[in-house]
């Protein structure tokens, strides 16, 4: 990492520079003021800014936003000789990664820089490049770069986080990124999907139950809150949580205590709560479907993931990433195919893009994904979205070409049965190469006997 130290005390600055160089940091520069720091930042990109708060002229607090505006993704560590909690909060609000109080031990700054380096490596961040990866998320858009910074900032606290956005935008990925960038990364990340469970089962899943608590409770059950102890509990689609259970979640967020269903003993756990919703919770509040007090408990830090149609510059890097994920790095998007992707509105967001790319890769002959292939896939996906049901698919006879957009496992199994396990014939039926059939079977865990 390239480090810029901003410190007006020359002796102290030189001491820090020697310390970092001794630890292997080969590119460490010095500046004595905020103005000089901005000049050096303009001359060449740095990865980390280590600055004193108290500087002649421009303060370290004033330097932070101006420095981060010059270099997107710049990590900032501030130093101060004053134990002032107000300054610490302001530093973090301005986008500083952390705060060191002078005098600090050498090991403190080395440990902090080591964490910064690990975080940057984990997210694949490279200063000065257009495309950034961050814990599974990929972007070339400025709005998502800002989302990544919000995730970084949220990860440094323990307060609840509310992630908003349409279905398919990657809200769970964002939640996982908050967890992975936090001090809880070694702990569990537990997901609870509210709409998938009826009221009675959801309560038991969250809080657990005692033996005999209700009919069928033959044994004691540990709930998700206990399983997530020391880590993060992610509520997917919190807007659909039944009103009956919302007061119990509110109670937990107030004191992080709960009772198992049928139990009288209060239990305490250390869990960070992250919730996500594709609904407008303001509308749900007005409709009486969501408690106002619970909303304010959850909405401490809000991260809103924009839909894919509002960040079209992300379509190309995402599409290429999904192609590589399928095991075909040599497959490329023809220019007219890319244009079709960029013109589509993506009502299903990134999830729809994944579906279209996976299907197109399977059906593509040769090494190019063409506009013709993508047109049919996008049209089929759009029709499915409008109708609310899968596009019709069938296997008519041995010469039929199968559409693998949906229910791939079922279709492959049917082709293998018709070809009596002969993979070459099955691939012919499916209209794909034998190599691609093997890849899909391996991905889906299928054998010719399935």
Image (spheres, rainbow, N blue to C red):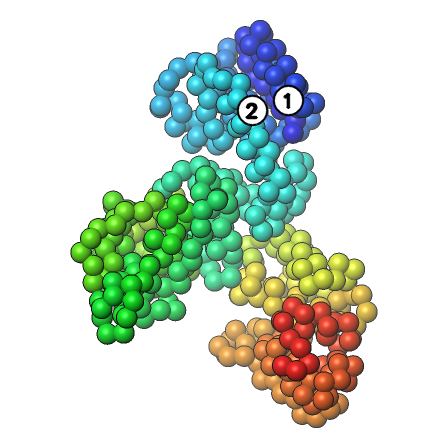
Query: Could you tell me how far apart the alpha carbons at marks 1 and 2 are, in whole angstroms?
Result: 8 Å
> Which numbered tag is attached to residue 23?
1
> Quadrant of the image for the C terminus?
bottom right
| SS assignment at label 1 | loop
Residue 415, by quadrant, is bottom right
The residue shown at (75%, 58%) is 329
Residue 225, by quadrant, is bottom left
| Vertical placement of residue 209 versus 410, above or below | above
Task: Please state which of residues 21 and 40 is positioned toward the viewer in this rendering.
Answer: 21
The residue shown at (62%, 87%) is 394
Q: Where is residue 416 in the image (x, y as percent from the top left)?
A: 69, 84
| SS assignment at label 2 | helix
Instruction: Specify the farthest residue to the right.
Output: 366
> Which numbered tag is attached to residue 110?
2
Closer to the chain start, of discs 1 and 2, is 1
In the displayed structure, does residue 147 sit left or right of residue 301? right
């Amino acid at each position: 990492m390239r480090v810029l130290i901003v410190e007006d005390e020359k002796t102290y600055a030189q001491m820090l520079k020697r310390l970092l160089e001794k630890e292997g940091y080969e590119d460490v520069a010095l500046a004595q003021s905020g103005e000089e720091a901005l000049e050096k930042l303009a001359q060449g990109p740095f990865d980390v800014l280590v600055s004193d708060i108290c500087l002649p002229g421009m303060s370290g607090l004033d330097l932070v936003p101006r420095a981060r505006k010059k270099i997107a993704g710049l990590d900032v560590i501030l130093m101060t000789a004053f134990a002032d909690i107000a300054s610490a909060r302001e530093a973090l609000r301005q986008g500083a990664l952390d705060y060191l109080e002078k005098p600090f031990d050498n090991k403190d700054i080395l440990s902090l820089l080591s964490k910064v380096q690990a975080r940057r490596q984990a997210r694949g961040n490279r200063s000065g490049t257009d495309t950034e990866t961050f814990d599974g998320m990929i972007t070339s858009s400025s709005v998502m770069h800002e989302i990544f910074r919000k995730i970084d900032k949220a990860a440094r606290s323990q307060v609840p986080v509310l992630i908003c956005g349409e279905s398919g935008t990657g809200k769970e990925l964002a939640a996982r990124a908050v967890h992975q960038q936090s001090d809880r990364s070694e702990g569990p990340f537990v997901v609870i999907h509210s709409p998938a469970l009826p009221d009675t089962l959801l309560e038991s899943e969250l809080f657990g139950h005692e033996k005999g608590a209700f009919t069928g409770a033959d044994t004691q059950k540990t709930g998700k809150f206990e399983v997530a102890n020391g880590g993060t509990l992610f509520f997917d689609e919190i807007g659909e949580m039944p009103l009956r259970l919302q007061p119990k979640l509110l109670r937990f967020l107030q004191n992080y205590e709960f009772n198992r269903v049928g139990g009288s003993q209060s239990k305490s756990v250390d869990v960070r709560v992250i919730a996500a919703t594709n609904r407008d919770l303001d509308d749900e509040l007005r409709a009486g479907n969501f408690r106002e007090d619970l909303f304010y408990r959850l909405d401490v830090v809000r991260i809103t993931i924009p839909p894919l149609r509002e960040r079209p510059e992300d379509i190309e890097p995402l599409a290429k990433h999904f192609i590589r994920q399928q095991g075909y790095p040599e497959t490329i998007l023809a220019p007219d195919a890319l244009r079709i992707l960029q013109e589509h509105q993506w009502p299903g967001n990134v999830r729809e893009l994944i579906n279209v790319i996976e299907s197109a890769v399977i059906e593509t002959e040769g090494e190019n994904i063409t506009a013709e292939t993508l047109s049919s896939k996008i049209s089929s996906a759009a029709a499915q979205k409008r109708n609310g049901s899968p596009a019709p698919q069938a296997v008519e006879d041995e010469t039929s070409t199968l559409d693998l957009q949906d229910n791939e496992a079922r279709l492959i199994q049917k082709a293998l049965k018709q070809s009596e396990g002969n993979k070459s014939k099955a691939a012919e039926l499916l209209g794909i190469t034998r190599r691609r059939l093997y890849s899909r079977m391996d991905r889906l865990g299928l054998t010719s006997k399935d």
